[in-house]
Image: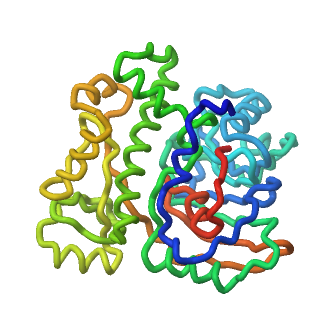
């Protein structure tokens, strides 16, 4: 990376577990060190024109695997679907849907670094977001002599207080400059990228950077789980959202993990927080030099939404491994395993 390029914007984010010593070490020394298993939202029905294929892939991106499967089965890659993108430098298991493919042919495939585990028909395409979450088993190497009691202490704090729902470094591009490019485009200092996908990528990076600021302020204040007047609070069970007015009542529900505060993914169609919480979000935009007109210029590529500022992690299993340790846990969709691991390791974790 060029020395003049922006630094990793996640490196300076405050830790929830700052009081616990770092383990150091390296993550993802080899694909087998980063194992991800998708937890689907539903099972395929057994009938229909879309073949749901569960695959285990090694060192391959999701689009690359879909392309290889589509070509091998002679189906249109553009009609394929998947619930989420999985890391390349990893061993990952996930479902993809292939329109017009046949189960027998899929199960007979022998492709480099792709293993077909199941093939079941379904009546609709697999859409983005159609998953509950992901199960991770991650190995940390080069952490000889690690104090497992301290690692488990850090893990226990995350289990109790929740994981700060920061966006990980990979959200900001390999050179960490996507948010800066979005700002320049927004201010008319550079032309918009030609490709619609790239435009969305840049806008999401800027939204993510601003969201991380909101979460960081709460973590630094020791208020990750606190409810503030006017917070837009979201139910974990149903996703329903409401404005926090009776703080004592809503805080008791947050303490019971029924609800959590949300933060802004700024955009013209984003629902705004009110009162104290709304004033804090407005102050952040002013501090960052972003106006409503600026948001309007990017509206087509990022309308805005809300995102939990914390997510539950009910169990984190820490086990010894040669030269380090292994961590196993489940995260909701959209949350980053590297964000949890930085709470334990406290070292920079590069984007994929």
Question: Which residue is drawn at the image coordinates 45% and 29% (left, top)?
Answer: 200
Percent of width and height locating residue 248 = 17, 78
Is any part of residue 52 visible from this angle? Answer: no
Question: Which residue is drawn at the image coordinates 69% and 51% (left, top)?
Answer: 54
56 on left or right of 167: right
Name the image quarter holding residue 247.
bottom left
Percent of width and height locating residue 174 = 63, 36
Instruction: In the displayed orientation, state which residue is furthest to the bottom.
Output: 149
279 on left or right of 22: left
Vertical comparison of 252 with 27: above or below: below
Front in this rendered view, residue 143 or 59: 143
10 on left or right of 60: left
Where the C terminus falls, by quadrant? top right
Vertical comparison of 285 with 31: above or below: above
Question: Which residue is drawn at the image coordinates 57% and 64% (left, top)?
Answer: 340
State the count of labels.
Answer: 0
Instruction: In the displayed orientation, state which residue is furthest to the front.
Output: 4
């Amino acid at each position: 990376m060029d020395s003049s390029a922006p630094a990793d914007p996640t490196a300076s984010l405050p830790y929830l577990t700052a009081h616990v010593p770092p383990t150091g070490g390296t993550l993802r020394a080899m694909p087998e060190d980063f194992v991800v298993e998708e937890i689907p939202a539903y099972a395929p029905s057994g009938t229909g024109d879309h073949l749901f294929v569960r695959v285990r892939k090694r060192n391959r991106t999701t689009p690359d695997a879909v392309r290889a499967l589509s070509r091998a089965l002679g189906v249109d890659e553009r009609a394929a679907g998947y619930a989420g993108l999985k890391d390349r430098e990893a061993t990952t298991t996930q479902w993809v849907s292939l329109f017009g493919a046949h189960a027998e042919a899929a199960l007979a495939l022998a492709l480099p670094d792709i293993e077909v585990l199941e093939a079941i028909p379904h009546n609709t395409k697999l859409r983005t977001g159609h998953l509950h979450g992901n199960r991770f088993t991650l190995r940390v190497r080069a952490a000889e002599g690690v104090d497992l009691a301290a690692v488990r202490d850090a893990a226990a704090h995350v289990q109790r207080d929740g994981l700060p729902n920061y966006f990980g470094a990979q959200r900001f591009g390999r050179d960490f400059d996507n948010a800066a490019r979005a700002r320049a485009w927004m201010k008319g200092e550079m032309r918009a990228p030609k490709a619609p996908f790239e435009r969305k990528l840049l806008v999401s990076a800027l939204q993510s950077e601003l969201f991380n600021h909101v979460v960081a302020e709460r973590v630094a204040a020791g208020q990750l789980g606190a409810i503030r007047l006017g917070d837009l609070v979201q139910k974990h069970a149903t996703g329903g959202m409401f404005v926090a007015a009776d703080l004592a009542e809503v805080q008791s529900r947050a303490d019971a993990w029924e609800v959590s505060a949300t933060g802004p993914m700024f955009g013209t169609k984003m629902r705004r927080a009110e009162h104290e919480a709304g004033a804090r979000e407005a102050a952040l935009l002013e501090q960052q030099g972003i106006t409503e007109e600026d948001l309007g210029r990017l509206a087509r590529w990022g309308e805005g939404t809300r995102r939990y500022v914390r997510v539950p992690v009910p169990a984190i299993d820490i086990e010894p491994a040669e030269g380090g340790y292994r961590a196993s846990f489940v995260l909701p969709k959209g949350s980053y395993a590297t964000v949890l691991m930085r709470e334990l390791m406290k070292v920079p974790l590069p984007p994929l």
